[in-house]
Image (tube, rainbow, N blue to C red):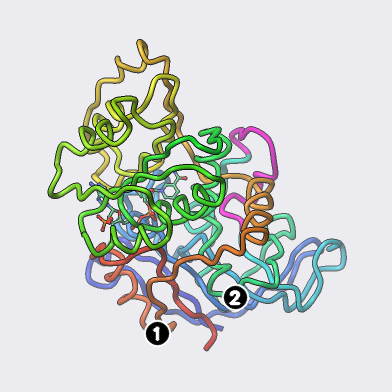
Amino acid sequence: MRRYEVFPDNIDAPLQQASFEPAPLGDTEVAVAIKAVSLNFRDILVTRNTYFAPISGGLVPCSDGAGEVVAVGSQVQGLAVGDRVATLFFPHWQSGKPDARALSDARGAESAGAFTEHFVSDERGLIKLPDGLSYAEGATLPCAAVTAWNSLFEAGDLKPGQTVLLLGTGGVSIFALQFAKAAGAKVIITSSDDAKLERARVLGADHGINYRRHPEWHEEVLRLTGGQGVDVVLEVGGPGTLERSLMSVATGGRIAYIGVLTGLAGAANPVMLIPKASSIQGIFVGSRAMFADMLAAIQTHVIHPVIDREFAFADAPAALEYMKSGSHFGKIVVRVGD
Ligand SMILES: NC(=O)c1ccc[n+]([C@@H]2O[C@H](COP(=O)([O-])OP(=O)(O)OC[C@H]3O[C@@H](n4cnc5c(N)ncnc54)[C@H](OP(=O)(O)O)[C@@H]3O)[C@@H](O)[C@H]2O)c1
């Protein structure tokens, strides 16, 4: 069997293919022939060892995989050989508010990830995929899509008619665009690229702002909302964008603090949260229950994830470089086992 392993100390080749022999299956475990993985910005952080958890050489990367169940342990009840499944980012976060246990063993960082031909998990760490989604589409969901869902509808409490601000056109933002439009919300999205803004408009975005042409983009957000600001911000930029997100949020609005695209260091003054009675909440992906709700919405609204490009298994290092370039719109997928 083949898999990828991460070696952050090897700057020239942090992602390397390796062969391995699968271990015997435990009683509650399930073996999955992974067919596709998707990349997330965090996979860049993992290969650089700048992720929240320290990364050991030899770790199997990637939280997001989808495939076919090929064997089940004697005590497995909910899955059978032939089922189509996706991985959970947090194998222990089943539902409700997270505690330390729920947010432990994050796949592809604190525990082995899905970038392997033979993935083994407790059955509670997998979720069945609906028939309407391909393996490539299913592989895009565990991290970016669940994060977008949690940010909009759990932490963000987004309601029809409200306005959401999305930063850039990467994986999280494009899922959020699709979900927010299906839920009847208005979307303002930013990008460095007019062609990407046009693609976002085709997907339903109400307004696009080029943040290169408008470095003071919060002023455009306020202009477009009649000075009111937006109800929900999905803050994927981090320290470099937070100050403007704070100025973009409406009275009573919510900022879902998700990402670090602009880097880890910096400072933003949150004082205006007080007179606006607005809030900011850290988001860490989501639970199986959120994943299930999201899959129901995906089926009802016939939503298909936006896959920018698919790579062959052997081309994983090129896929990672492509992600680093930021040229993509939506998700990047690597096929496994072909
Ligand atoms: N907390 C969580 O649970 C969680 C979950 C998923 C992701 N994240 C984090 O969220 C962030 C986004 O993840 P992702 O996987 O969606 O990333 P991604 O697909 O790599 O997004 C890349 C895109 O972000 C946009 N971007 C880059 N710098 C920007 C800036 N200064 N302002 C606005 N947009 C900017 C660019 O869009 P344009 O080309 O259109 O300009 C770029 O193409 C990352 O920091 C990731 O680590 C966190």
Q: Classify residue 30 by image quadrant.
A: bottom right
User: How many neighbours does mark 2 have within 10 angstroms: few (below 14), some (14-19), or many (20 or more)?
Assistant: some
Amino acid under disc 1: Ala
Compute the Cα span from label 2 to label 1. 21 Å
Along the viewing direction, whichever of 151 and 40 lies nearer the viewer: 151
Is residue 317 placed above or below 273 in the rendered structure? Answer: below
Q: Quadrant of the N terminus?
A: bottom right
Callout 2: helix, strand or loop?
loop
| Principal secondary structure, stretch drawn in magenta | loop
The mark lying in front, picked from 2 and 1, is 2
Please state if 302 lies on the left or on the right of 209 as rendered: right
Instruction: Look at the numbered disc 1 and give the secondary structure of its residue.
Output: helix
- Residue 271 coordinates in the image, percent (x, y): 30, 15
Residue 216 in the image, given as x and y percentages of width and height: 16, 36
What residue do we see at 65% from left, 44% from top?
93
Report x, y in % for residue 11: 23, 66
Which residue is at a point 54% across and 70% down the rendered structure image?
137
Q: Which residue is mark 2?
A: 134
Q: Which residue is mark 1?
A: 314
